[in-house]
Image (cartoon, grey):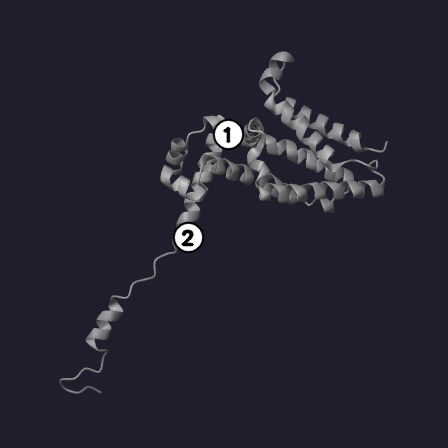
Amino acid sequence: MEYKGQSVGPARGVEREAMTVKTPAKPRVRDAEATQARILAAAKKEFAKNGLGGARVDVIAERAKANKRMIYHYFNSKDELFQRVLEAAYVDIRTAEQKLDLDRLAPREALERLVRFTWEYYLKNPEFLTLVNSANLHKAKHLKRSEVVERISRRFVDMVGGLLERGEKTGDFRPGIDPVQLNITIAAIGYYYLTNRFTGAIVYQRDLMTPAALEERLRFNIETVLRLVSTA
C-alpha cells in the first residue's frame, strides 16, 4: 500500500550508504608470498649459474620483477637468500624421496628404485648439483645454521636405515651397513659422473651423455650398489 507524499522504501541516507560499501581488499599476504616465490625461483637460477660469489642481486631482482629493496626486506641479505635457496633445494629432493613409498617394496626392489630415482633426479635437476658445488666452496656454512636441512636429512637417513634393516631380516642385505655411507655412495656414483662429464669425455674418449651411455651408467650404478649390500 502506498501513501501520497510518503515512501515506504529505505531512507535515502541509508540507501546511499549501502551503495558506497566497498568490497574488502584481498589480503596482501598472497602478494607477499608470490613475490618471495618469484625471488627464490630467480635466485635459484642465478646462484646455480654463477655461484654465491658471482651471483648479482640486481639480476635476481630483474628476473623476479621485483626490486632490490624487496629482496633485502624479505631475505635480509644475499647470504640468507642463498641459504633459503639451498634449503628449498634439499627439501625438494628429500620430499620426492619420501614419496617413493619404499616401505611397500621388497628390499632389493626398493633399493634399486632409490638408486634409479637419485640418478634421474640429478639429470632432471642439474641446478641441484651446481648449488651443492657452490655450498661446498663456502664450506657449507649456510647449511650449518639450517634447522630445516638437519631435520629432513635425519628423516632420510632413518628411511634408508629402515630399508637396510628390512633387507637384513629377509636375508637380502648383509648386516652392519651404515645408511649414511650407503647414501654417500649412491649420491657419489651419480654426482661424480655428471659433474665431470666434460673432462670425462676427453679422458675416456667417449660421449658420456648420449641416451645409451646414460642408460649404461644407470645399470652399472644399480648393479654396483646391490652388489655392495648383498649377502651373496
Q: Around disc 1, counting alpha carbons within 10 Å, would you say few (fewer than 14), some (14 to 19), or many (20 or more)?
A: many
Identified at 65% across, 27% down, the residue is 190
Question: Which of these two is toward me, 48 or 154?
Answer: 154
Quarter location, residue 220:
top right
Does residue 136 sit above or below 203 in this rendering?
Answer: below
Give the x, y percent position of residue 98: 65, 44
- Residue 100 seen by the camera: no
- Residue 22 seen by the camera: yes
Q: Around disc 2, counting alpha carbons within 10 Å, would you say few (fewer than 14), some (14 to 19), or many (20 or more)?
A: few
- Could you tell me if the residues under marks 1 and 2 are in contact, i.e. CB atoms within 8 Å? no
Does residue 21 sit above or below 56 in this rendering?
Answer: below
Q: Is residue 97 left or right of residue 50?
A: right
Q: Is residue 17 left or right of residue 135?
A: left
State the residue position of label 1.
48
Quarter location, residue 19:
bottom left
Give the x, y percent position of residue 68: 37, 37
Does residue 47 sit above or below 14 in this rendering?
Answer: above
Identified at 26% across, 70% down, the residue is 18
Question: Considering the numbered disc 2 on the image, is that residue within a helix, a strand or a loop?
Answer: helix
Question: Which of these two is toward me, 220 or 80?
Answer: 80
Q: Which amino acid type is shown beneath numbered disc 2?
A: Val
Question: Which of these two is toward me, 109 or 81?
Answer: 81
Q: Is residue 54 left or right of residue 149?
A: left
Gap in Å between the C-alphas at discs 1 and 2?
28 Å
Label whose residue precedes the other's in the sequence (1 or 2): 2
Question: Which of these two is toward me, 53 or 107?
Answer: 53
What's the mark number on residue 112? none
State the residue position of label 2.
29
Q: Is residue 60 left or right of residue 137?
A: left
Query: From the image, which quarter does the N terminus lie in?
Result: bottom left
Image mark count: 2
Give the x, y percent position of residue 216: 68, 24
